[in-house]
Image (tube, grey):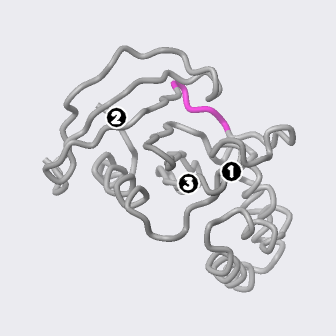
């Protein structure tokens, strides 16, 4: 048993999600840290490649916000990407340092890989006003979590600590195995 004590308590019958590229949608309840944690879950089997679909680069959904955010980083537009977050200064500083360390060409190439089959969407976990995308990074060989929240009717990359983000982060840690892969029981 993992330290966070993950147990699946219930599963409702899955249905096809219309908003999330054909994934199977279900409600799940997990026991994390001794407390029930209920969420909506969309599972993609097989995982869905993140594509550079310019029509889907908006903040209408977390998936689209993710596409737009990483497309801007792939162009080297750190300032533009930072505006898609709830903490633009933090994002600008973090990615500016990364670009300076790697060099602009390598930085842009790294984020372009996101759309070249380097990232595949496995799960979307949803609680009110917050979502966590779980993507498999082929180059790293492990799953990564991205956090999004609704602010003034649009989805934003969630960089600031919040109760919802922290709950989803605990769930992510509880679901990861020793190889860094998320598996939903």
State the image coordinates of residue 112 (x, y, percent, origin top left). 78, 56
Q: Position of residue 27 (x, y in %)?
A: 37, 27
Quarter of image, res 33: bottom left
Figure check: 92 above or below 54 = below
Identify the residue under disc 1.
Answer: 154
| x 78%, y 72%: residue | 78
What is the magenta range?
45-49
* Mark 1 nearby-residue class (10 Å; few <14, some 14–19, many ≥20): some
Left or right of residue 6: residue 101? right
Distance between mark 2 and mark 3 Cα atoms: 22 Å
Q: Is residue 56 magenta?
A: no
Q: Residue at x 19, y 31 (%)?
A: 9
Q: Secondary structure at mark 1?
A: strand
Q: Label 2: which residue?
A: 184
Give me the C-alpha separation between circle 1 and circle 2: 28 Å
Using a 10 Å C-alpha cutoff, classify the residue at mark 2 as few (fewer than 14 neighbours), some (14 to 19) or many (20 or more).
Answer: some
Q: Which mark is residue 149?
A: 3
Q: Of all residues shown, which one is farthest toward the front?
A: 152
């Amino acid at each position: 048993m993992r330290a966070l004590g993950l147990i699946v308590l219930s599963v409702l019958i899955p249905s096809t999600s219309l908003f999330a590229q054909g994934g199977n949608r279900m409600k799940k309840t997990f026991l994390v840290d001794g407390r029930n944690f209920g969420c909506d879950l969309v599972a993609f089997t097989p995982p869905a490649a993140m594509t550079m679909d310019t029509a889907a680069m908006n903040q209408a959904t977390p998936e689209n916000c993710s596409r737009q955010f990483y497309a801007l980083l792939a162009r080297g537009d750190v300032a533009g990407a930072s505006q898609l977050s709830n903490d633009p200064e933090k994002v600008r500083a973090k990615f500016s340092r990364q670009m300076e360390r790697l060099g602009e060409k390598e930085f842009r190439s790294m984020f372009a890989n996101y759309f070249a089959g380097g990232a595949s969407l496995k799960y979307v976990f949803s609680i009110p006003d917050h979502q966590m995308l779980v993507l498999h990074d082929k180059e790293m060989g492990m799953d990564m979590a991205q956090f999004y929240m609704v602010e003034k009717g649009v989805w934003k990359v969630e960089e600031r600590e919040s109760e919802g983000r922290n709950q989803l982060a605990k769930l992510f840690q509880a679901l990861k195995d020793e190889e860094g892969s998320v598996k939903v029981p």
